[in-house]
């Protein structure tokens, strides 16, 4: 037993010497545990000691002369760092679609602003849509690496984020609370003072102003305000002013494509009118049942989309397109209809795919989903790629008549307009009916007048009497 204790003491002494040479304070704090265990003669394995570096490791083995009962002291201590707070990360531009290579950045946040995880920091406006860039973690904007309005490409560094930090405004918010004013000085009792309260003799203290850092506000964060009234000169004539606003990428792309359509296609427009009495009565009779079963309202758009698909399958040339590169005509055996949707940033045309196999409920659900994405600026490029035919509904804005422009590389576009009561001749009598003018603009290089007029009459027949779809007439 005495020999065993001497061996333990010798090994512990060696261990203490090694720890002292390493000059590790936390490691020396663990020596007491080893000494206590050594005095009791128990075997000890110190697997880890919190707060110690993993790069230091001390192993003390008993010599062979200590006998079979000698203990092996192996001390391993590790240092686990705390969570990576205040870490600065660089956020890059997300990858664009194949047809998009660059865009213009519009900042929603400024340097010093606090952001939550997945909160939008900026938007990148491309030719077709806007791509939102969210924050990967909660923190504070450390630096903006690209000026507002500048061009960026995929994978380019956008901004630096300090994770886990809190903005100066939020940190100093408690200090901004005004201290309670000191009690007013005592005044001699009087009749007036007792009835209306003490009369203050000093000015109340001014609350302290928080010393928050002033951060620059991005251009996109400034909301437009009403223009100031024009100042008239001495003669009473109002001043003549003007201001300029840079066109965004989507508006530039729309202007370019419309001009290309005018320069490329031989556009011609034919018109017709549709009696909306039957479809209105059908909608009025079944709208509640339709809403209860499909959880979506029944509108007129689904009738025109389905009628267009039916007419496109009947007239393949309207669903085709000229390939100017190979000088060939491409006929599609499927129907993908683009529906024009107006947004604050411009006109977008999300695509309803496979319309020939859809019913009214499927079409209404798809239109509703695409419309919600367009209003929330969540449309992806894939949602607008393709399309064999386009429908533009100007009737939602009260339009009565108009000639739409072809959406290239398509060959035709249908223009819907408002529904207005007009006198029409029915069976030799004049009746007031809800009527809508429809217009078909087509590329006369591919589509002849006969096909265009027949196509529009097919749409008129299906909308006026949906039973034509059931009878395949």
Image: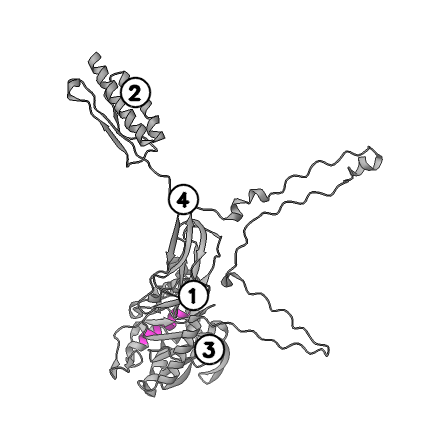
| Colour convention of the picture | one colour
Q: Earlier in the sequence, mark 2 or mark 4?
A: 2
Q: CA distance from mark 2 to mark 1?
A: 91 Å
Q: CA distance from mark 4 to mark 1?
A: 62 Å
Identify which residue, 86 or 10, lies in the foreground: 10
Identify which residue, 205 or 423, lies in the foreground: 205
Q: Earlier in the sequence, mark 4 or mark 1?
A: 4
Q: Residue at x 29, y 75 (%)?
A: 472
Q: Locate residue 73, reporting x and y percent.
A: 23, 25
Residue, disc 4: 85
What kind of element bears circle 2? helix
Count of numbered marks: 4
Residue, disc 1: 285
Which label belongs to residue 435? 3
Screen quadrant of the N terminus: top left
Q: Locate residue 250, reporting x and y percent.
A: 42, 71
Mark 3 or 1: in front is 3
Q: Which residues are magenta?
A: 297-310
What kind of element bears circle 1? helix
What kind of element bears circle 3? strand
Mark 2 or 1: in front is 2
Q: Residues within 10 Å of mark 4 (few under 14, many from 20)?
A: few
Q: Earlier in the sequence, mark 3 or mark 2?
A: 2
Residue, disc 2: 35
């Amino acid at each position: 037993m005495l020999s065993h204790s001497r061996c333990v003491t010798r090994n512990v002494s060696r261990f203490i010497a090694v720890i002292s040479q390493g000059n590790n304070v936390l490691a020396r704090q663990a020596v007491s545990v080893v000494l206590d265990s050594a005095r009791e003669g128990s075997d000890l394995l110190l697997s880890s000691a919190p707060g110690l570096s993993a790069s230091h490791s001390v192993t003390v083995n008993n010599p062979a002369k200590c006998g079979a009962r000698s203990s092996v002291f192996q001390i391993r201590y590790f240092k686990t760092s705390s969570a990576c707070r205040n870490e600065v990360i660089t956020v890059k531009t997300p990858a664009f679609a194949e047809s998009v290579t660059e865009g213009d950045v519009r900042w929603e946040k400024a340097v010093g602003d606090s952001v939550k995880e997945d909160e939008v920091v900026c938007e990148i406006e491309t030719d077709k849509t806007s791509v939102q860039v969210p924050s990967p973690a909660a923190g504070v904007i450390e630096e903006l690496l690209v000026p507002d309005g500048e061009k960026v490409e995929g994978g380019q560094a956008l901004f630096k984020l300090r994770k886990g930090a809190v903005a100066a405004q939020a940190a100093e918010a408690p200090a901004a609370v005004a201290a309670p004013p000191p009690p007013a000085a005592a005044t001699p009792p009087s009749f007036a003072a007792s009835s209306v309260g003490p009369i203050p003799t000093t000015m109340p203290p001014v609350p302290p102003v928080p010393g928050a850092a002033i951060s620059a506000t991005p251009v996109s964060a400034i909301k437009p305000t009403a223009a100031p009234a024009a100042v008239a000169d001495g003669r009473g004539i109002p001043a003549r002013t003007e201001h300029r606003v840079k066109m965004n990428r989507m508006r530039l792309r729309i202007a370019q494509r419309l001009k290309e359509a005018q320069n490329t296609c031989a556009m011609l427009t034919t018109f017709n009118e549709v009696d909306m009495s039957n479809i209105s009565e059908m909608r009025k009779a079944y709208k509640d049942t339709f809403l209860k079963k499909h959880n979506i309202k029944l509108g007129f758009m689904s009738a025109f989309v389905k009628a267009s698909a039916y007419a496109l399958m009947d007239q393949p040339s309207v669903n085709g397109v000229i390939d100017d590169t190979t000088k060939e005509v491409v006929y599609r055996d499927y129907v993908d209809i683009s529906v024009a949707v107006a947004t604050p940033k411009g006109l977008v045309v999300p695509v309803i795919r496979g319309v020939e196999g859809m019913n009214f409920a499927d079409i209404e659900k798809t239109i509703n989903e695409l419309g919600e994405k367009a209003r929330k600026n969540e449309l992806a490029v894939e949602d607008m790629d393709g399309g064999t035919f386009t429908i533009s509904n100007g009737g939602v804005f009260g339009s009565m008549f108009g000639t739409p422009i072809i959406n290239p590389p398509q060959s035709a576009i249908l223009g819907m307009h408002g529904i207005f009561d007009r006198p029409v001749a029915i069976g030799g009598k004049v009746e007031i009916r809800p009527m809508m003018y429809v217009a078909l603009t087509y590329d006369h290089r591919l589509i002849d007048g006969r096909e265009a007029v027949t196509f529009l009459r097919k749409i008129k027949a299906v909308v006026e009497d949906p039973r034509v779809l059931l009878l395949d007439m």
